[in-house]
Image: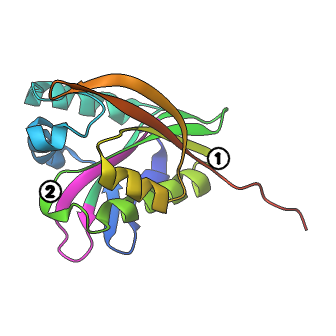
């Protein structure tokens, strides 16, 4: 996350605050990533992830020019409830991939993910001057699909039966947010 001062500050929203992910967040993040209920919604299988692998990943993103990862804090309580990120940042092409995990299950379905997505989209548009943000989501992740829709993401493609979960094949949706063209005058 080698983007200088733009990622050294906290970014407040209505329900959450985003701040750069720190080393102190790794143990909690590892618990979420290896939790089978949380893991079922993630685009990769992290069930066997180790603390050493998580630390190696963290060290990698510190120098990455294509990744920015944030801790999501409950604005009221100040507790770390999840992480969100911009990956595959392409400044020339004006695009990136968005990822989010609300690891604390008691925060699911209460608008914390939606608020985090809005903040992250606004950050990508205003601070990084990107115009297209895309993501992948499994069709059984109804809460996430609803949150992305509230944040103006549109489905652009369906990858049919490409994800095996619990003995059944599921579709993956590719969704994107496109910045509206600005009018002159």
Q: Return the residue at label 2.
A: 104
Q: Which residues are magenta?
A: 73-87
Dot 1 falls on a residue whose secondary structure is loop
Residue drawn at the location 47% of the way across and 62% of the way down = 150
Near mark 1 (Cα within 10 A), the count class, few <14, some 14-19 or many ≥20, is some
Residue 137: give x, y in percent of width and height. 37, 39
Assign the C terminus to one quadrant of the image. Answer: bottom right
Disc ID at residue 131: 1
Quadrant in the picture for residue 78: bottom left
Q: Main secondary structure of the magenta part?
A: strand
| Image vertical order of residue 98 relative to residue 142, above or below | above
Dot 2 falls on a residue whose secondary structure is loop
Residue 148: give x, y in percent of width and height. 44, 54
Would residue 20 be seen by someone viewing this image from the given angle? no
| Image vertical order of residue 175 relative to residue 146, above or below | above
Residue 21: give x, y in percent of width and height. 28, 48
As drawn, is 10 to the left or to the right of 179?
left
As drawn, is 75 to the left or to the right of 123?
left
**In the foreground, 162 or 76:** 162
Residue drawn at the location 31% of the way across and 55% of the way down = 143
Near mark 2 (Cα within 10 A), the count class, few <14, some 14-19 or many ≥20, is some
Quadrant in the picture for residue 36: top left
Would residue 51 be seen by someone viewing this image from the given angle? yes
As drawn, is 7 to the left or to the right of 130?
left
Mark earlier in primary sequence (2, 1): 2
43 drawn magenta: no
Residue drawn at the location 30% of the way across and 46% of the way down = 141
Residue drawn at the location 18% of the way across and 31% of the way down = 55
Quadrant in the picture for residue 33: top left
Cα distance in 3D space between marks 2 and 1 = 30 Å
Disc ID at residue 13: none
**In the foreground, 161 or 11:** 161
């Amino acid at each position: 996350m080698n983007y200088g001062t733009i990622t050294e500050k906290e970014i407040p929203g209505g329900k959450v605050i985003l701040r750069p992910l720190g080393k102190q967040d790794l143990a909690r993040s590892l618990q979420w990533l290896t939790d089978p209920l949380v893991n079922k919604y993630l685009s990769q299988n992290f069930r066997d992830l180790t603390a050493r692998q998580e630390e190696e990943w963290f060290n990698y993103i510190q120098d990455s020019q294509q990744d920015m990862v944030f801790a999501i804090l409950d604005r009221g309580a100040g507790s770390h409830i999840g992480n969100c990120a911009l990956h595959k940042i392409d400044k020339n092409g004006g695009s990136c991939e968005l990822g989010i995990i609300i690891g604390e299950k008691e925060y699911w379905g209460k608008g914390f993910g939606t608020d985090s997505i809005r903040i992250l989209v606004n950050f990508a548009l205003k601070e990084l001057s990107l115009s297209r943000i895309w993501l992948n989501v499994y069709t059984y992740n109804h809460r996430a699909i609803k949150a992305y829709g509230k944040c103006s993401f549109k489905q652009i493609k369906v990858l049919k039966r490409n994800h095996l979960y619990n003995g059944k094949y599921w579709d993956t949706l590719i969704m994107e947010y496109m910045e509206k063209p600005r009018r002159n005058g």
